[in-house]
Image (cartoon, rainbow, N blue to C red):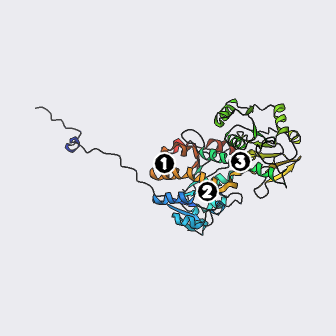
């Protein structure tokens, strides 16, 4: 008699089964807090009323601390009509799941945040202390630095946008100083028939330099650009569509250009500190009444005579040369800068909601991963870790 074999599968298991399809991700509802900037130098805001309206239409809630938009000429009423809740308590804005700030929060502001919140702000690494990162770790905050965010073209969209503003503004500021009878010499930046054109020297060939050169050329000035990267100089000429004077940085050639120029723009950024390209003796030989705008002052400046100034007292004179060394130039044009930042942030926020919330979005969005330097209180950025001597983990090992 043959032995009966038993199947390891039940009859139900052998029957045709229904196909299991992936359930679509449920859209997340975001609760976004926008506190008022505490720094007197900072007037920008991360979201404009139009951006708040776009988020509100998609069912997201925005809590705005009263007066947060005043520096950019947006009233509480503008935000209220766009769908935001106006709060008179900073703690309510900091208590949202996602907090948006331009400047990084102070330690006392981090104390107002709820544990496990997500923070979007600038990092401003050179101005931070070890205690700042310890405060974020204690609250298990997930923090994204918008100056670290890279897009699919591997460019830094926020940094590039603000650099465009700073470059254009540097020429406008220099023009304003030159035309003043009090500080300048009552000169017009431009090319008028029968009058020699203004000479502008630009140190650097990056985004700031490109937009400074574009603005100066548009006004009819003669422009000379110095940089040690030939590829950057080529790209600059290509971007401008004009064969302007370019040169590598050679002391004698640079000295001659500085002696003849009316305006010198510093736009060189180093890996840690901006290199000092122009010595004090070179500044001494410049024209009396010439203007220096050191855009790279936020990284130490590339003129030896540069000293940090403020928006309230932006200039000083040294060796007869007027120096403008305000670190945060885009804040002077706060409304333009706010619109620019808002246009970058809004698609990110809508995408986070589409992916079902921040946790899901960060798994698939490489740009968010690159911008992140804290994940639930764990440091994930190597450059920050090296700068402060802190331990860090690879973000890819944490989000699986």
Q: Does residue 376 appear in the picture of this structure?
A: no
Of badges 1 and 2, nearer the viewer stands 2
Q: Position of residue 228 (x, y in %)?
A: 73, 32
Under circle 1, the secondary element is helix
The disc label shown at residue 101, or none: 2
Under circle 3, the secondary element is helix
User: Which circle's residue, 1 or 3, is located before the other in the chain?
Assistant: 3
Q: Position of residue 246 (x, y in %)?
A: 74, 32
User: Which of these two is toward me, 45 or 145?
Assistant: 45
Q: Residues within 10 Å of mark 3 (few under 14, many from 20)?
A: few
User: Which of these two is toward me, 132 or 34?
Assistant: 34
Under circle 2, the secondary element is loop
The quarter in which the N terminus is drawn is: top left
Instruction: Identify the residue position indicated by label 3 in the image.
Output: 126
Q: Does residue 253 appear in the picture of this structure?
A: yes
State left or right for residue 42 relative to residue 302: left
User: Which circle's residue, 2 or 3, is located before the other in the chain?
Assistant: 2
Q: Are marks 1 and 2 in contact (CB under 8 Å)?
A: no
Give the distance between the C-alpha atoms of the residues marked 1 and 2, in whole angstroms.
20 Å
Q: How many marks?
A: 3
Residue ranking furthest to the front: 194
State left or right for residue 321 relative to residue 189: right
Displayed quadrant of residue 11: top left
User: Which circle's residue, 1 or 2, is located before the other in the chain?
Assistant: 2
**Up-down: is 63 above or below 23?**
below
Of badges 2 and 3, nearer the viewer stands 2
Instruction: Identify the residue position indicated by label 1 in the image.
Output: 361
Give the distance between the C-alpha atoms of the residues marked 1 and 3, in whole angstroms.
29 Å
Q: Position of residue 367 (x, y in %)?
A: 54, 44
Q: Residues within 10 Å of mark 2 (few under 14, many from 20)?
A: many
């Amino acid at each position: 008699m043959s032995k009966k074999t038993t199947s390891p599968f039940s009859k139900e298991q052998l029957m045709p089964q229904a196909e299991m399809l992936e359930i679509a991700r449920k859209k997340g509802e975001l609760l976004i807090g926008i506190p008022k900037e505490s720094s007197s130098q900072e007037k920008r805001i991360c979201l404009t009323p139009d951006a708040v309206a776009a988020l509100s239409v998609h069912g997201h809630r925005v809590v705005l601390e009263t007066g947060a938009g005043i520096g950019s000429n947006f009233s509480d009423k503008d935000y209220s009509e766009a769908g935001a809740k106006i709060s008179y308590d900073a703690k309510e804005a900091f208590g949202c799941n996602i907090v948006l700030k331009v400047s990084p929060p102070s330690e006392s502001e981090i104390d107002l945040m709820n544990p496990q919140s997500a923070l979007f702000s600038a990092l401003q690494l050179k101005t931070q202390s070890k205690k700042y990162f310890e405060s974020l770790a204690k609250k298990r905050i997930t923090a994204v630095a918008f100056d670290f965010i890279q897009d699919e073209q591997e460019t830094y969209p926020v940094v590039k946008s603000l650099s465009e503003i700073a470059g254009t503004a540097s020429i406008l500021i220099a023009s304003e100083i030159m035309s003043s009878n009090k500080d300048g010499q009552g000169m017009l930046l431009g090319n008028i028939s029968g009058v020699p054109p203004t000479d502008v020297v630009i140190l650097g060939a990056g985004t700031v330099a490109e937009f400074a050169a574009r603005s100066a050329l548009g006004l009819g000035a003669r422009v000379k650009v110095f940089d040690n990267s030939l590829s950057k100089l080529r790209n600059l000429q290509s971007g401008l569509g004009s064969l302007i004077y370019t040169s590598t940085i050679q002391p004698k050639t640079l000295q001659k250009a500085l002696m003849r120029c009316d305006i010198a723009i510093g736009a060189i950024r180093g890996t840690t500190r901006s290199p000092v390209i122009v010595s004090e003796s070179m500044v001494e030989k410049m024209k009396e009444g010439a203007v220096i705008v050191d855009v790279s002052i936020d990284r130490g400046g590339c003129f030896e005579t540069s000293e940090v100034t403020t928006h309230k007292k932006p200039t000083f004179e040294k060796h007869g040369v007027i120096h403008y060394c305000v670190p945060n130039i885009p804040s002077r044009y706060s409304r333009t800068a706010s619109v620019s930042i808002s246009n970058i942030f809004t698609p990110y926020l809508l995408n986070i909601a589409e992916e079902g919330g921040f946790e899901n979005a960060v798994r698939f969005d490489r740009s968010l991963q690159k911008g992140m330097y804290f994940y639930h209180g764990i440091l994930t950025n190597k450059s920050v870790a090296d700068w402060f001597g802190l331990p860090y983990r690879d973000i890819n090992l944490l989000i699986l």
